[in-house]
Amino acid sequence: MPNSRWLPESQQGFKDKLDVTITTLFSKREAFGFGTTTDNGKWLDTVFSPAVTRYVSAFNDWKDENTRSHIEVTAIHEAREKLEPLYRHLARILHESLSVDNLDLDKMGLPLRGTDKPTPSPVSTTPPDIQIRIVRDGVLGVAFSSADPASSARPAGQHGVEVCFAISDTPIVEHFQLQNSRFATRPPVEIEFFGQDRGKLVYIAARWENNVGKKGPFTRIYQVMIP
């Protein structure tokens, strides 16, 4: 059974992990035993998916700090309270399915089989190489790769990259000031900003994260103007 601590506490981290799980699951739902006529498939479509839709809607209302009020805060907490046990139930189904292997679980951001807690891979001792580019107006893309030219795009044992960022009128020099984050298992990480933020400075850094969520050292902090 999956361990109980695999879900991120932050709303952004929870949403990012949910996106990873849903993308992989729906791309292979038939192979995983979630076809539309199966009991699991019907549960997925009629119970889990509506809860996801409610949470995503609440998240989109909540994420703008400029308009966030107690109404949005209450709504997202209520939506997550409804979704989280369903998400854990989904993880248990996938964990126990003979049609799903550890590679599939890893791609979905779920705990691996073998022990109650996956065996931790060593945390990378070096930060990733990153390149920041303009994707389109209001969107920046962060590409990442191993700093070791002899290694693959992602060092062995690293589940993905956490990109941390913050918009600030004054220079940011400490990584703890980067209070927003995105997680991805493959590049690029796309960060979308609100229209009123265009032309402002955003500060960005990244670090590897292993298969149990332990993080390596940060890159330096980059300063970029939001397109």
Image: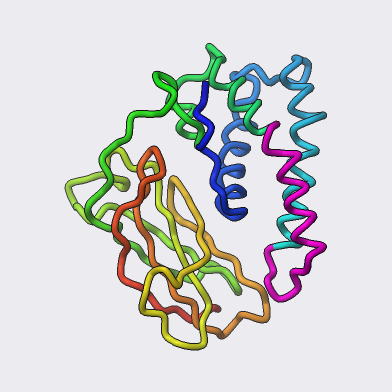
Q: Residue at x 51, y 68 (%)?
A: 140
Q: Residue at x 63, y 37 (%)?
A: 22
| Looking at the image, residue 151 lies above or below residue 167 | above
Q: Residue furthest bottom?
A: 170
Our reading of the magenta stretch's main secondary structure is helix
Nearer to the camera, 79 or 133: 79
Nearer to the camera, 40 or 119: 119
| Looking at the image, residue 10 lies above or below residue 179 | above
State yes or no: residue 42 in magenta: no
The x, y position of residue 81, in whole percent, is 73, 42
The x, y position of residue 42, in whole percent, is 79, 22
Please state, as top left, top right, bottom left or bottom right, where the C terminus lies in the image: bottom right
| Looking at the image, residue 90 lies above or below residue 197 | above
Q: Residue at x 74, y 53 (%)?
A: 76
State yes or no: residue 67 in magenta: yes
Q: How many marks?
A: 0
- Give the colouring mode of the picture: rainbow
What segment carries the magenta color? Answer: 63-86
The x, y position of residue 175, in whole percent, is 38, 69
The x, y position of residue 178, in whole percent, is 46, 69
Q: Quadrant of residue 61?
A: bottom right
| Looking at the image, residue 200 lies above or below residue 87 | below
Q: Residue furthest left?
A: 150
Nearer to the camera, 178 or 26: 178
Left or right placement of residue 177 versus residue 27 in this view: left
